[in-house]
Image: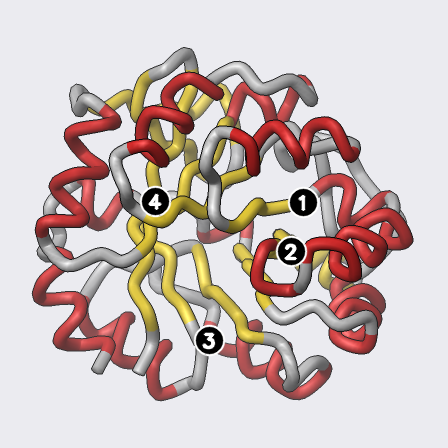
Amino acid sequence: MSMLIPAIDLRDGRVVRLRQGDYALQTTFEFNPLRLAASYVTQGAGWVHIVDLDGARSGRFENLDVIAAIAASGVRVQAGGGVRDDAGLARLFDVGVSRVVVGSIAIRDPATVARWLGRYGPERLTLALDTRYRDGHWQLPSAGWIEAELATLDELAPWYANAGARHLLCTDIDRDGMMSGPNLSLYAHLAGIAPALKVQASGGVSSLADITALREGGVAGIILGRALLEGAFSLADGMVAAC
């Protein structure tokens, strides 16, 4: 069984989706983020995944009030976007986030994230190693996917598994928001190089068949964004396919 985790991406306090991480290719949805989170919980969600897109690019928490309000509603929140240091991590924990997603700093400063894993434990952190396949490597862009980095997925995923990490969120950026189907070979590759990690698959899910395929591929979690917002299927039906 794979856990379904509905996603709410925030920009200027509004629910949005990007295509392939491009801030210029934004779709804005007329959903109140708090009501949207509540509707997902009503349909059976145990977790909601929240991304502060403004914070991911700027390194500042620009939608913290919305994240705090959703966390205060009682749902378990996995959230990230803008965590760059100890203070930023503490701010998200302080507003009730159950599990903080660390992306850019996980790529740029693994030693700091390893220290956090030791201090807070592996259940409080999700590593976001979002990736593009270029020049024969799974590259790891940062800062809202706009800055190139030297580290690769094949280097960092096993390193973090050895450092005690448990949860890894991995998006194929080329499929993000495209509803073109998930990259099953990417998740099979991750299972081969870092089998100890519980992988959350993200990017491209457009049908119940995609959920079934990911479940059969062994991923621990499936992030659902545009497919739910555009009504491709209901969260309840998705949960049946994930069992």
Q: Position of residue 166 (x, y in %)?
A: 62, 71
Q: Earlier in the sequence, mark 2 or mark 4?
A: 4
Question: Answer yes or no: do the residues labelled 2 and 1 have beta carbons within 8 Å?
Answer: yes
Question: Answer yes or no: do the residues labelled 4 and 3 have beta carbons within 8 Å?
Answer: no
Q: Secondary structure at mark 2?
A: strand
- Using a 10 Å C-alpha cutoff, classify the residue at mark 2 as few (fewer than 14 neighbours), some (14 to 19) or many (20 or more): many
Q: Position of residue 97 (x, y in %)?
A: 47, 40
Q: Earlier in the sequence, mark 4 or mark 1?
A: 4
Q: Residue 210: name its quadrant.
A: bottom left
Depth check, mark 2 against mark 3: the one in front is: 2
- Using a 10 Å C-alpha cutoff, classify the residue at mark 1 as few (fewer than 14 neighbours), some (14 to 19) or many (20 or more): many
Label 4 – label 1 distance at C-alpha: 16 Å
Q: Earlier in the sequence, mark 2 or mark 1?
A: 1
Q: Which residue is mark 1?
A: 103
Q: Which residue is mark 3?
A: 184
Task: Please give the name of the residue rendered at 80% of the width and 39% of the height, measured from the top-left corner.
Answer: 148
Q: Which residue is mark 4?
A: 7
Total numbered labels placed on residues in the image? 4
Q: Earlier in the sequence, mark 4 or mark 3?
A: 4
Q: Which residue is mark 2?
A: 127
Question: Answer yes or no: do the residues labelled 2 and 4 have beta carbons within 8 Å?
Answer: no
Viewed as shown, does residue 123 lie left or right of 211?
right
Viewed as shown, does residue 169 lie left or right of 160?
left
